[in-house]
Image (cartoon, rainbow, N blue to C red):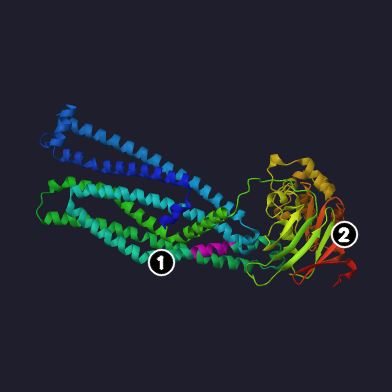
Amino acid sequence: MVKKVFLVLDRHQKTRVYLLLLMILGGALLETFGVSAILPLVSAVTDPTIIETNKYFKFAADTLNIHDSKLFILVMAIALIFIYAIKNVYLILLNIAQNHFYTNNLRRLSVRLMKCYLSQGYLFHADHNVAELERNVNRDVSSFMYVLNNILQLITESMVCLLLTAFLMLTDVFTTSLLIIMLAFFLTFFALVVRKRLKHYGSCSREKDGEKNKFFLEAFGGIKEIKASSTEKHFLKKYEQAYIGFAFMEQKKLTLTYIPRPLMESLCICGLLLFMAIKIVLGTDVNTFIPVMSVFAVAAIRMLPSFNRVSGYLGSIMFYKSSVDALYNDLTEADRLEKETPVSREDIINIPSADIVAEHISFSYPARPDKKILDNVTVRIPCNKSVAFVGPSGAGKTTLADLVLGVLDPQGGTVTVGGVDVIKNRKSWHKNIGYIPQSTFLMDDSIRANVAFGLNEDEIDDNKVWDALNAAQLSGFVKEQPDGIYSNIGDKGVKLSGGQRQRIGIARALYNNPSVVVLDEATSALDNDTEKAVMDAIYQLSGKKTMIIIAHRLTTIKNCDIIYEIKDSKATEVKYNQLNPS
């Protein structure tokens, strides 16, 4: 898993990790030096004659020209204070650097994954639930960074423990070896028994997290229908059941990662007490092992929290393995697609105002590759004419329009405008298209922001907003609002009527003055009077723009110049009076 973690990181992030590791090594050395510095001071306090009898103490005393034992001990104590002050300042700076690395890369990875999803084709989003994508961008990225942070912290604590263990080995081999054997046995048991359970609980927790997000979005996404049918309890129960499963898995994780801590603490304390008992039974002079015991006591104070954190880090790394795997797979797939997709150096080209020609188009959805939605279909959409696609549900009307839009890629055939392949020049083609769906997506924002969809506040041209509202026959309503185009329309346009919402969609489609307007059953959810008013606004554009209209109600296409009937995977040009009103 560590390999996957580092494969997800880019070169800049890896460089930061290596710098952090160097800083961590420096912190570990300072931690070890801080503990080891206790031994000389305790030795001098318990036996002041050591200053003259021990060659290292004598060398220090001669160098400093201090031979008074009390003054020498005072200098040592002051030096130790400085050592701990420097060590702790360094550790604070190290913690700041680690926190910066964590939060900054949390943002970078989340944006990177968001970009990955937004770059996927329309079929990808048709196959994936938005709650799952939200979980991946938030939970999986947070879990990944949590794992990476735990790995770095694990390295930090491991280095400190290893260096302190090496120093303790030099101090007392027998006692240190005894503690190492007990801790090694315990960690092996923990890794073998707990690891699989934590991985399983982590995978289940991730699944339940996706479910509760899904039920939450469903509940508030359909709040009007829920209120109208008084089905709040049903959706609340589904959300609660998912949360019960999620909470249960989190509880298991917290329990399994906590249990090792008191057990490890008991092992260390018992080991030290056993050491003291053995020394006393063997008749060892207490004064000779008091300095050693002092060092072990200080080391235990520092190392016990480290051992506890190490067990916690290992548990969390195992628990969030499924999130790391999912993030790795998504980003690896994104990198693969990015490498396979040729990068166009000419992002935007001029698409001429000409006929749209879809020739020999064939298409089937990946889920049913054997079922042809469109088979060798050819249609011509004359410039500045209105063309209708009609036919039974599921015949392929919207699919053909999506292929013309460039939302889908045909498996056979081409879509050209004036000889330009619009599938290969998708960005340029989309600059020329205004799209009005059956249900217009509206943001909880102002009319201005919803019309100038996808633009920053300082990029919006108010004159173009008003021109679009006039063309959609909505300017009168907007002028009546207290804040005009700055009036907020609520979540999903809840403050507007159905007809007004669709007119906002029309205004949005017309904001950039496109040469082609596509209406995908844009009036099917409206009543007859509202539909007529909306279509009157649309037909004001006749002769000025190329219009593609998909409709079930034949009354909406009565004034179209050309009508194509989509049926049995084919497209046939028909007259209005040839259509069956049923």
Q: Is residue 393 visible?
A: yes
Left-right relation of 165 to 67:
right
The residue at the far front in this view is: 419
Mark-to-mark CA distance, 1 and 2:
67 Å
Label located before the other in sequence (1 or 2): 1
Q: Which mark is residue 197?
A: 1
**Residue 411 figure quarter:** bottom right
Front-most of 435 and 82? 435
Split into 4 quadrants, where in the image is the N terminus?
Answer: bottom left
Front-most of 348 and 513? 348
Q: Is residue 208 magenta?
A: yes
The residue at the far right in this view is: 577
Q: Is residue 438 visible?
A: no
Label 1 crowd (10 A; few <14 / some 14-19 / many >=20):
some
**Residue 402 figure quarter:** bottom right
Q: Secondary structure at mark 1?
A: helix
**Residue 348 figure quarter:** top right
Position of residue 250 measured from the top left corner of the image (x, y, whole percent): 46, 62
Q: Which residue is mark 2?
A: 561
Position of residue 120 measured from the top left corner of the image (x, y, whole percent): 61, 56
Left-right relation of 40 to 327:
left
Q: Nearer the viewer, mark 1 or mark 2?
A: 2
Magenta stretch bounds: 204-213
Q: Secondary structure at mark 2?
A: loop
Split into 4 quadrants, where in the image is the C terminus?
Answer: bottom right
The structure residue drawn at horizontal position 36% and vertical position 52%, both measured from the top left corner, is 154
Q: Amino acid at mark 1?
A: Arg
